[in-house]
Amino acid sequence: MSLIATILSLGSGLLAVIVLVQVMAARTGLPDATVLSLAGIALGSLLPFAAAILPGPVQDGLSLLFSPSLPAEAYLWVFLPPLLFQSALSIEFREMLPDLGPILLLAVVAVFVATAVIGFAMAAVTAQGLTVCLLLGAIIATTDPAAVIAVFREVGAPGRLMRLVSGESLLNDAAAIAIMSVLLAMLSGDAAAASPIAGLRELAVSLGGGAVFGIVAGRITAALLPALGGLALAEAALTLALPYPLYLLADRGIGVSGVVAVVAAGLVINALGRTRLSPRNWTHLQLIWEQLAMLAGAMIFLLATLQARHLLGGMELHDLLLLLVLVVAALGARLLVLFGLLPLLGWLRLGAPVSTAYKLVIAWGGLRGAVTVVLALGLAENPVLPPEQRLFVARFATAFVLFSLLVNGTTLRWVIRMLGIDRLSPQNQALQWQAVHLATTEVLGRMAETARTFHLPEEIARQAAAEYRTGMEAGLAQEDFDLALPERDRLIIGLVTLATRERSLIPLFSSGVISIRNLDTMMRNTGDMIDAARREGRLGYNRAAQRILQSGWTMPVLEWLDRRLGLRRPLENALSDRFELLLCRRAVLEQLRRYNQASIGPLLSGRMTVLLDSVLVGRIERLDQAVDQMRARFPDITATLEKRLLLLQGLRDGARVIDRIRDESLISPEVADRIQRTMRASWRIALTRPPHRRDGRESRQDEAPKAAP
């Protein structure tokens, strides 16, 4: 059997194992990483015995699994970029900003503390040198949120707890790998990089340079996305082509952190991609990367645990005691940061306090995962270290990962329930009861309609409805909604919900209907509205919403350039951007009013519906005032833009109608394609903003009304 055929067969076999593991994890409720580890250990123990009776080509293939001859960097190059990029692409970074202080403490400072505590503890009880033990500490200082977040979601853990854990794991990989590089330089005898001062300088340059390089690469990629014409496969392919060359060029080409570069690029595309891709294509992109990261993480777990028998087979009772010291030191380092350093941020007003229960769950839930395994396997093949040191670090790092997954991972649910973190607050319990009550009322009406459609007996319909109601309301205590959730709290919930919904509606105007600059501006503004509503309620929400109406200092400058120097095009572009923004915001607000009436109002009470609607009406009135003033001052420009906007929206709606008619088999695909080609040609023509005629109809500046506040 050729090498290529062997590799393809092994890959197919590993994918089949991953499928079985996914099914077993879903049925048992255990984290995927834990089940993968158990499966890998079982296969690693059984296959060597089964290989004796298998054909020679199969034995050769299995030898690639148990002792792959890969260079040290291969594990980092192959598995690390997709894992890091997907984490950055899927994270809600803006939601983490209020907790940026605690996240940076856990992601950076905690890595240094863990490296030091583990290094000194292991150096005190082993014959290995301090530098080697520090290297072990740096490798196992990284955390993996995948298994933890899955458990959090299953038990209903608070969102803030999930954000703290996700933010920590996103950034601590870079710090750990940077520390690891400095320690390897010290072990290799590189005097230029071995001193503490040189190490810190290299660390700063590596992290800072990687961040800058990744931001630039991310912005270039985001700028190219709109040029792909909305082709989902092309957009996904462009992002797939980014992480690997970016990591290698940063790490090997310019000597900065490839990890930070990949994470920074992923965060930039995460922030800008929603306004450059349609909502459907953005979801498609996220699904592709989620699948790719899942496969990469599962593959590395299987490869590592298949070799666990080789790495851990020679461990004796003394080594198990050393593993216990390692576990205690790692847990102690996390507790030291959480209970010793984290409270300082609250005293310095650099972050909201973190409760004791949260700290204990974060400490116990610091599971190690794919990145730690990648670093351990890469180090096991690194010729810089003597074989004894390589085996020591790889063995204990692998053993520690397995311990955290098999012990911490399987008991995390119990810890969360014991600490009561899965219990809802009285306010959330009231919202839960209200939501269940409303949903039950609507579903029972639909069940009755279904019974009439199928001509089912009324008695059967009543029994099914009673059983449904009993099942939905089981275990729920009926709450006095008005007492449990005061009106001010309900108003804040409603305002945050409106701003969040507004943020999801804005990308619907992408694909050229509204400029990307306007979409980015509105997305930033809705983020400000969410933060302001949480801090200051209605007053903060209105202030943030009104901020986007202010034209700033640029408009008077552009008008002066037009009047004095005849430079009209910059003014036309600025006016076009502003007018499109106002019209788009107006359309979004009308959709929000309907959303408030249909969804928010019934949940938060009728009075809240009226109150939230009055907030939206006030915003609409201010927008209408600004639009009317622009129409009065620049009638030619606004008329051209209104016609263009209406034409683009009509072409988009027409394309959807043709798609629906084709899907209903009313016309053939060939006829639909002909119509769509005509529409696409008209779309391309309408996308370009036409030059505005200077016909003298614009009002003089001194005759114009004042700008909207």
Image: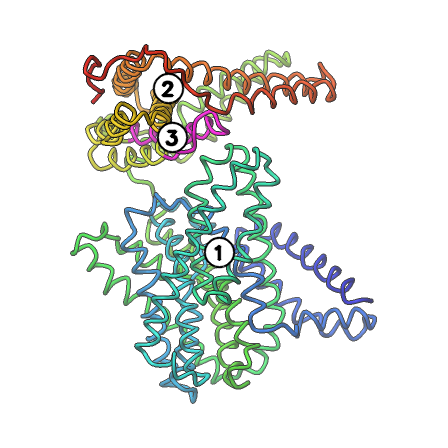
Label ID, residue 84: 1
Q: Say few, some or many: other residues with alpha carbon within 10 Å of mark 1 (under 14 / 14 to 19 / 20 or more).
A: many
Q: Residue at x 35, y 54 (%)?
A: 418
Q: Is residue 484 something that shows in the picture? A: no
Work out how far the residue at label 3 is from the one at label 1, CA to CA, in angstroms: 30 Å
Q: Residue at x 51, y 26 (%)?
A: 467
Foreground mark, 1 or 2? 2
Answer with mark 3 or mark 1, whichever residue precedes in sequence. Answer: 1
Against 11, is 308 above or below? below
- Give how far across and how far down residue 277 sits, in percent: 50, 35
Task: Look at discs 3 and 1 and give the one toward the viewer.
Answer: 3
* Type of the residue with mark 3: Asn
Q: Amino acid at mark 2?
A: Leu
Mark linked to residue 583? 2
Residue 375 percent across, percent down from the top left? 50, 69
Q: Which residues are magenta?
A: 493-520
Q: Is residue 494 magenta?
A: yes
Whole-number angstrom distance, CA of label 2 to CA of label 3: 11 Å
**Residue 77's quadrant in the figure?**
bottom right
Secondary structure of the residue carrying tag 2 is: helix
Mark 1 to mark 2: distance in Å? 39 Å
Is 550 placed left or right of 462 in the picture? left
The one of 89 and 479 positioned closer to us in this rendering? 89
- Badge 2 vs badge 3, beta-carbon distance below 8 Å: no
Mark 3 lies on residue: 518
| Colour scheme of the picture | rainbow
The reply to whether callout 1 and callout 2 are in contact (CB within 8 Å) is no
Furthest toward the front, the residue is 565
